[in-house]
Amino acid sequence: QITLNECTDKIQRKTVNHNSAELELKNCKKALEDFQCRIKALIEEGLQYGVSQKENTHMEIIKNSKELKENELKLEELSLAVQKENRELNEITSNKTKSDAKIHDILNELKSTQQKIESLEKNRNNRLSVFGPFTQSIQNKINEFVKKKIFQYSPLGPIGSLISVEDSKWRLSVEICLKDTIRSYI
């Protein structure tokens, strides 16, 4: 599996190759334009000079035409190479993006797990925390209402904290039977 640094290095190498291929492509295009201008100039010169000059010009035109065709072939090869490099660069960039997303997801999951661990350790000695995160705040409100004499008697609960099962094999059955009432108060 490719690491993030390897992907980045590969992208940089491909980018350098791509840039140099594009530069060479530009140079070939420029040379092509120069040859075309030169051919036009030679044709015009050929019309102005005598027959022998026309022959020399014609030979130079043929030579330049061959060079032009060679440069066109080179240009086509370079274009194909640039396209291939672009495809590879896009694939590597896509893989890097996917890897970054996976890393981000893993880091978020790790952070969430660490927060859960911290919360569990914080509530390790609190028996009421097993009945939900708000149980302690409910208990505090009940105590406040008892002090203010809003409740004549303090409600008992959560019910699950008042039940003890002697044989552990019955714990799950009792939990299933009581369902959400295990968190209720009497």
Image (cartoon, rainbow, N blue to C red):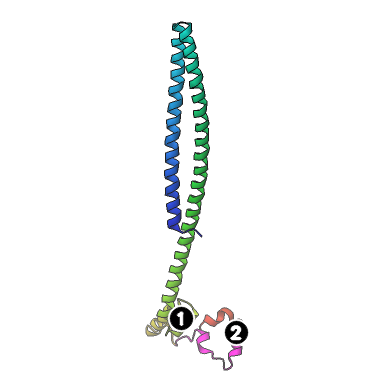
Segment colored magenta: 153-170
Q: 153 or 37, which lies in front? A: 37
Residue behind mark 1: 129
Q: Residue at x 45, y 14 (%)?
A: 42
Q: Residue at x 46, y 5 (%)?
A: 50
The answer to whether residue 186 shows anywhere in this view is: no
* Count of numbered circles on the image: 2
Residue behind mark 2: 172
**Amino acid type, residue under disc 1 in the picture:** Ser
Residue 176's quadrant in the figure? bottom right
Establish if 119 lies above or below 7: below
Q: Secondary structure at mark 1?
A: helix
Residue 134's quadrant in the figure? bottom left
- Callout 2 touching callout 1 (CB < 8 Å): no
Label 2 to label 1: alpha-carbon separation:
18 Å
Magenta part, dominant SS? loop
Establish if 8 lies above or below 69: below
Q: 149 or 13, which lies in front? A: 13
The answer to whether residue 129 shows anywhere in this view is: yes
Residue 166 is labelled as none
Specify few, some or many for label 1: CA neighbours under 10 Å numbering under 14, 14-19, or 20 or more: some
Residue 129 placement (x, y as % from top left): 46, 80
Q: Residue at x 52, y 81 (%)?
A: 183
Q: Secondary structure at mark 2?
A: helix
Give the mark nearer the N terminus: 2 vs 1: 1
Establish if 116 lies above or below 91: below
Residue 145 placement (x, y as % from top left): 40, 81
Residue 13 placement (x, y as % from top left): 43, 48
